[in-house]
């Protein structure tokens, strides 16, 4: 039986980066040993993101209101479950996540039986390593996650990740709204899911603007810290 994988591309105003990303992704899909389908989840973009995606033959799920990254990803996860996909992969629409690496995530999940596979930029130190302030934050969240769960996840804020059926079912019922990556991993760990990291080489964003600016970083640290503790103590 062929393994079916949905690639979820949450999108908010990524008109500039989508053409290159989707063209590259489609080339990689044609060479894949797996059945891979991309879908763009349009989070009320104000530019032509949805038009660009459709013009390249990619299915688009339009959200009725701006739900943020967590809501967009959860929408894609629910879609994957409803269509019977074995795995889903989150791939950012800004071009930072290399499509050529998605096969590595799938193969690792199959080989190790992992429920969650994270594409990590820090295991080999190659490619774009993010800014100094963000690397500092990632180290902090890595430490906090290890304290809460006992697990060491080096690139805990990476959005390039694969979810298996168990993880998808959990995420369909509960998934954090803003900056969901660290909090969701605490949630998955609490439910006993197997989480594995694999090295990937990430790039600078190809267009658009990051949702986390310099001044927002402090707010991000505080909010995510509280969210990780909440995810740890919540009952379900």
Image: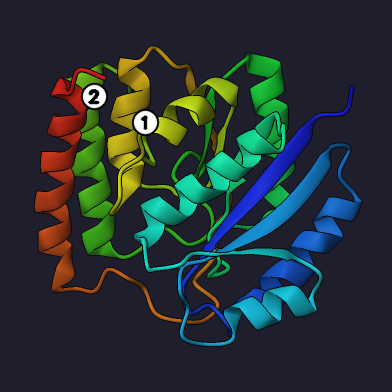
In the rendered image, the vertical position of residue 155 relative to residue 46, given as above or below? above
In the rendered image, the vertical position of residue 48 relative to residue 234, given as above or below? below
Q: Real-space Cα distance between discs 2 and 1?
A: 8 Å
Which residue corresponds to the image point at 52% horizontal and 30% vertical from the top-left?
A: 168
On screen, residue 32 versus residue 141, left or right, reads: right
Residue 126's label in the rendered image is none
| First reached walking from the N terminus: tag 2 or tag 1 | 2
On the question of residue 232 being in view, the answer is: yes
Which residue corresponds to the image point at 46% horizontal and 35% vertical from the top-left?
A: 172
Secondary structure category for the residue under label 2: helix
Looking at the image, the residue that sits furthest to the front is: 64
Q: Are marks 2 and 1 in contact (CB under 8 Å)?
A: yes
Query: Looking at this view, is 198 or 195 the one in front?
Result: 195
Q: Position of residue 226 (x, y in %)?
A: 10, 41
The residue identified by callout 2 is 146
Q: Position of residue 13 (x, y in %)?
A: 48, 79
Which residue corresponds to the image point at 49% horizontal and 64% vertical from the top-left?
A: 63
Secondary structure category for the residue under label 1: loop
Residue 153's label in the rendered image is 1
Q: Position of residue 72 (x, y in %)?
A: 46, 56
């Amino acid at each position: 039986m062929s393994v079916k994988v949905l690639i979820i591309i949450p999108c908010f105003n990524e008109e500039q980066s989508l053409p290159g990303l989707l063209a590259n992704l489609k080339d990689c899909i044609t060479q894949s040993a797996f059945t891979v389908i991309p879908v763009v989840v349009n989070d009320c973009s104000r530019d032509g993101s949805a038009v660009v995606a459709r013009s390249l033959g990619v299915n688009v799920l339009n959200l009725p209101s701006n739900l943020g990254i967590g809501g967009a990803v959860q929408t894609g996860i629910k879609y994957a479950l409803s269509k019977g996909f074995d795995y889903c992969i989150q791939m950012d629409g800004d071009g930072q996540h290399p499509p050529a690496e998605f096969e590595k995530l799938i193969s690792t999940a199959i080989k190790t039986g992992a429920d969650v596979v994270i594409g990590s930029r820090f295991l080999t130190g190659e490619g774009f390593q993010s800014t100094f302030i963000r690397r500092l934050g990632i180290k902090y969240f890595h430490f906090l996650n290890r304290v809460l769960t006992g697990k060491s996840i080096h690139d805990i804020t990476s959005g390039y990740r694969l979810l298996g059926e168990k993880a998808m079912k959990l995420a369909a019922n509960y998934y954090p709204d803003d900056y969901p990556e660290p909090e969701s991993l605490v949630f998955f760990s609490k439910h006993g899911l197997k989480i594995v990291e694999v090295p990937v080489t990430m790039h600078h964003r190809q267009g658009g603007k990051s949702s986390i600016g310099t001044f927002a970083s402090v707010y991000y640290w505080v909010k995510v810290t509280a969210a990780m503790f909440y995810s740890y103590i919540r009952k379900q």
